[in-house]
């Protein structure tokens, strides 16, 4: 007997996962890179949808699923990075998005649609999980998103006494110009307690972030702000602790426009961006997000202003594929696709082993007795056995 999750994986993995003969050579890598656009409309979508289905089946509580998580300290510019990648105007007032993880699913489809739902944490009782799964909203305008997030916050039972939740808000956005990408946004790390954030809040967020980034199938998008000394930014300490070789981390530097051109501080950050200080195997990326008085700008205006910024000064010497939001989207799409190709075969093996162990336990219990008559017959047989 196979579990629903095992059937999902078995049905689709054979057609989606290349053999060792098909992947791994430099020629194959060039082929993957050159045909990225076609992959985004076929194989990549199917791979991403497969992982999403496994997550919806509750497998993330017992298996580490491949994913990209976006994390950083509070005020690192993480919200602006997420908004630039997704082109979703996330609400900034009241920090509604920072009290739980938010899964953003983007898919390329002919029609536009936005759907929101809650994926409950597996630690809840079954009836509570069922109640939370019933939360589902379809909206036509991103202007409705703040009220949806507010509703989800209340549905999760968050209030002054319960500040954070392990439940996940899932937002699926479809449209003809959307990249094929799934991201998990995590609450910003807090440096120290204050009037509105207690020591318990600090530890809760730290625990939540570390839970995600410690998973070996998680790619970490670590956001740091050039306004603050990167040696003091908590997320880098956590990444170096939980991903010591830097094999799963891509660093994103925000707010480079706050650095004085030609200054020693600018050179320090440029060295970081070029992997000369903190080394990440996946490298670094720079973004210039809107300032506090520029959030009224459209995505087109934002992207144009960013492109102009990186064609001037020291930044014009950097490779184009490590600056700007367009190249970051391409990097993330390619990175996630290749990550899924590598991880799904071992994921299937783990699922097969777990299913075999469960089947062994089920067989040890004997045949099932679903009807009352069968149960009574068994009990009667059991009761008279000692008399024979």
Image (cartoon, rainbow, N blue to C red):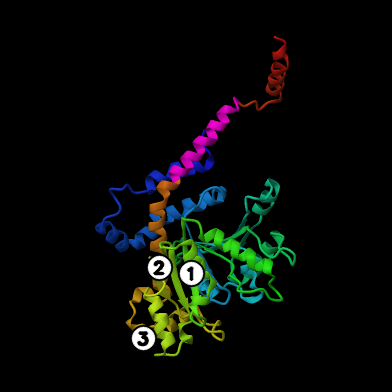
Give the crowd class for mark 1: few <14, some 14-19, many >=20 residues within 10 Å: many
In the image as oriented, which residue stretches furthest toward the right?
Answer: 161
* Proximity of marks 1 and 2: CB atoms separated by less than 8 Å: yes
Q: Earlier in the sequence, mark 1 or mark 2?
A: 1
Q: Which residues are magenta?
A: 348-367
Task: Determine the residue positioned at 40% across, 68% down.
Answer: 280
**Residue 323: percent from left, percent from top:** 39, 76
Residue 238 located left or right of residue 160 = left
Looking at the image, residue 62 lies above or below residue 196:
above
Give the crowd class for mark 3: few <14, some 14-19, many >=20 residues within 10 Å: few
Q: Which label number is shown at residue 314?
A: 3
Main SS, magenta residues: helix
SS of the residue under disc 1: strand
Q: Which quadrant holds the C terminus?
A: top right
Q: Which residue is mark 2?
A: 280
**Residue 322: percent from left, percent from top:** 37, 74
Q: Earlier in the sequence, mark 3 or mark 2?
A: 2
Quick check: is 244 in the magenta stretch? no
Measure how far apart labels 3 and 2 are at the Cα level.
Answer: 22 Å
Q: Which label number is shown at residue 274?
A: none
Q: Nearer the viewer, mark 3 or mark 2?
A: 2
In the figure, residue 114 lies in which quadrant? bottom right
Looking at the image, residue 303 lies above or below residue 135:
below
Q: Which residue is mark 1?
A: 222
Task: Determine the residue positioned at 56% across, 84% down.
Answer: 292
Please state which of residues 63 and 374 is positioned toward the viewer in this rendering.
63
Instruction: Tell me if I can see residue 311 in this picture.
Output: no
SS of the residue under disc 2: loop
């Amino acid at each position: 007997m196979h579990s629903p999750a095992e059937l999902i994986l078995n049905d689709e993995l054979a057609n989606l996962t290349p053999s060792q003969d098909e992947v791994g050579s430099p020629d194959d890598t060039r082929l993957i890179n050159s045909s990225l656009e076609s992959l985004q409309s076929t194989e990549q979508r199917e791979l991403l949808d497969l992982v999403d289905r496994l997550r919806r089946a509750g497998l993330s509580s017992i298996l580490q699923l491949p994913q990209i998580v976006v994390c950083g300290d509070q005020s690192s510019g993480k919200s602006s990075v997420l908004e630039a990648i997704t082109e979703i105007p996330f609400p900034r007032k009241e920090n509604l998005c920072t009290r739980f993880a938010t899964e953003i699913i983007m898919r390329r489809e002919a029609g536009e649609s936005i759907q929101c739902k809650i994926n409950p944490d597996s630690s809840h009782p079954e009836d509570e999980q069922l109640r939370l799964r019933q939360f589902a909203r379809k909206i036509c305008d991103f202007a409705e998103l703040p009220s949806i997030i507010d509703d989800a916050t209340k549905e999760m039972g968050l209030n002054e006494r319960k500040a954070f939740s392990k439940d996940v808000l899932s937002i699926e956005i479809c449209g003809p110009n959307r990249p094929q990408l799934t991201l998990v946004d995590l609450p910003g790390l807090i440096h120290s307690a204050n009037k509105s954030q207690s020591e318990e809040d600090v530890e809760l967020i730290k625990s939540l972030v570390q839970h995600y980034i410690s998973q070996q199938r998680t790619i970490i998008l670590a956001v740091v702000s050039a306004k603050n000394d990167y040696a003091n930014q908590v997320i880098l300490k956590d990444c170096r602790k939980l991903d010591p070789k830097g094999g799963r981390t891509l660093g994103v530097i925000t707010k480079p426009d706050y650095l004085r051109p030609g200054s020693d501080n600018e050179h320090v950050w440029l060295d970081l961006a070029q992997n000369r200080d903190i080394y990440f195997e996946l490298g670094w990326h720079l973004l210039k997000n809107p300032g506090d008085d520029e959030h009224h700008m459209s995505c087109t205006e934002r992207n144009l202003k960013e492109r102009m910024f990186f064609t001037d000064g020291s930044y014009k010497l950097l490779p184009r594929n490590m600056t700007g939001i367009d190249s970051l989207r391409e990097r993330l799409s390619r990175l996630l696709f290749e990550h899924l190709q590598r991880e799904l075969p071992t994921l299937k093996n783990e699922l097969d082993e777990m299913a075999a162990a469960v089947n062994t336990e089920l067989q040890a219990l004997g045949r099932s007795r679903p009807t009352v008559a069968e149960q009574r017959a068994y009990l009667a047989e059991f009761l008279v056995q000692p008399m024979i």
